[in-house]
Image (tube, helix red, strand yellow):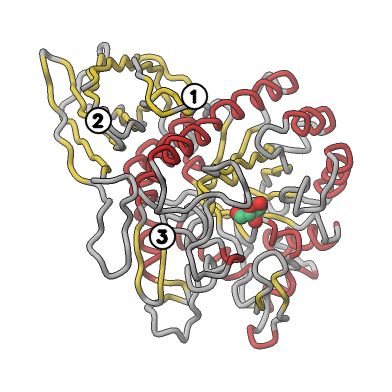
Amino acid sequence: MKELKLTVNPQKTKSHINREIYGHFSEHLGRCIYEGIYVGEDSPIPNKKGIRTDVFEALKNIRIPVLRWPGGCFADEYHWKDGIGDKSSRKKMVNTNWGGVVEDNSFGTHEFMDLCEELGCEPYVSGNLGSGTVQEMAEWIEYMTFDGISPMAELRRKNGREKPWKLKYFGIGNESWGCGGNMRPEFYSDKYKQYQCFCKNYSGNQLYKVACGPSDKDYNWTEVLLSNVTSQQTQAISLHYYTVPTGNWSHKGAATVFEDSEYYATIAKTLFMEEIVTKHSEVMDRHDPEKKIGLIVDEWGCWYDVEEGTNPGFLYQQNTMRDAIVAAINLNIFNEHSDRVVMANIAQVINVLQAVILTEGERMVLTPTYHVFDLYKEHQDAELLESSIENFITGTGSDRFNAVSKSVSKDKDGNVLITLSNASLDEDAKVVCDLGEFGFSKAEGRIICADDPRDFNDFDKDPKVFPKDLAAETENGSLVISLPACSVVSVRLFK
Ligand code: AHR
């Protein structure tokens, strides 16, 4: 048993943790939108206007703050006018990126924007810069946000929506260095400036424009982009980084079958997020010392080989206790960098990659990753507190790193949330907290752990990985948190 000291300075707030750090991503990919979110009004699966009720309630429970849509790679081949109006006459298209399946466009702008409104979350729409025109992008914004008389506002009204929606987050191109057009950063920067120029603020709606940023450690992309665009033209840039256990895209490793060494390799790969966020932030600090431009990690999570027997283009994978550790580490990293990281969106919300929810027909499973978002939700819109922890090294071979990750925040009522993860597979830890002057009346702890890091929640079986209460104890006047091997813990301290 390791004894570690966590020191918190309750007086020293460092940055605001935007609730959007707890965001999600939904793409027209596999069974994310269709089957996962949208089943259609005639489905026997309980739904409201075609949206699954079970999924809706589960997302509300974790207070989903923002949902990105319609892609991903799909966004740069999406033509929004195909997804409005009478469903029976909507155009069908081929989803070239994801399995070559037919996309019938029955889930489009109205369905997405209404869903976000009902969930109380911000919509984050990705515009098509790769294969769409400037006019198409400009008109989409006019359609969604203009309250006056104009061709697009009239079209929206004709399609049943009188008032515009509120739209803040708008992405201009996705992975423009890859599936979004194979561009050089110089070329993309120019295109970005042209497209953004026609993304107007209508009727009091204020857009927060997001430029396509780098892939993992492509610091040159960030450098060139920020040398060319101003904070008037872009409010944030995106960053994509996926955790691939083997580091080999043709053989990524399986979601539920892995050796301990592959577990540690996965954690080492996910910890690389700390390095790339730090280094991109350094580039951003040089160009934007006042931090007017945010960093949005709008695709992150584990990417494994697809489950056997499933369509390789659907990216369906199970989710184990290992994924819970990965989620906990990443969310702690984003909290700790919330001076620059203003949003993050795990890929993807349902049935794709590191999903928080899986569905099969009418059945639904909450994954270990879902429960991490639940344990961490009180960080949303709280203030990050200065904190430090003594650590210890875990891992195997060349994959050795600090076992414990942490972040601590204070909410608007003065309550404190401590979140911790222990990535070691065999060393339990006892965390003794020095909370300075902070006195609390009540402590509520919750823990996610499993008998085995390969444990997952399956359909028609009792869940194996779910939160349990954790008694927070006091020893010699100090709060003591038990942090077993391979666990995620949250402790909420009430003033
Ligand atoms: O999330 C799956 C895909 O990964 C997205 O469509 C793309 O942006 C990224 O390469």
Say what amino acid the circle numbered 2 marks: Leu
Residue at the spot 83% in from the left edge and 49% down from the top edge:
195
Residue labelled with disc 2: 483
Between the residue at mark 1 and the residue at mark 2, the CA separation in whole angstroms equals 26 Å
Residue labelled with disc 3: 357
When the figure is inspected, residue 384 is found, relative to residue 73, above or below; the finding is above
Mark 2 is surrounded, within 10 Å at the Cα level, by few (under 14), some (14 to 19) or many (20 or more) other residues, namely many
Say what amino acid the circle numbered 1 marks: Ser
Between the residue at mark 2 and the residue at mark 3, the CA separation in whole angstroms equals 26 Å
Residue at the spot 57% in from the left edge and 43% down from the top edge:
242
Mark 1 or mark 2: whose residue is earlier in sequence: 1
Label 1: element kind:
strand
Residue labelled with disc 1: 15
Residue 164 found in image quarter: bottom right
Residue 146 found in image quarter: bottom right
Whether residue 124 is visible here, answered yes or no, is no
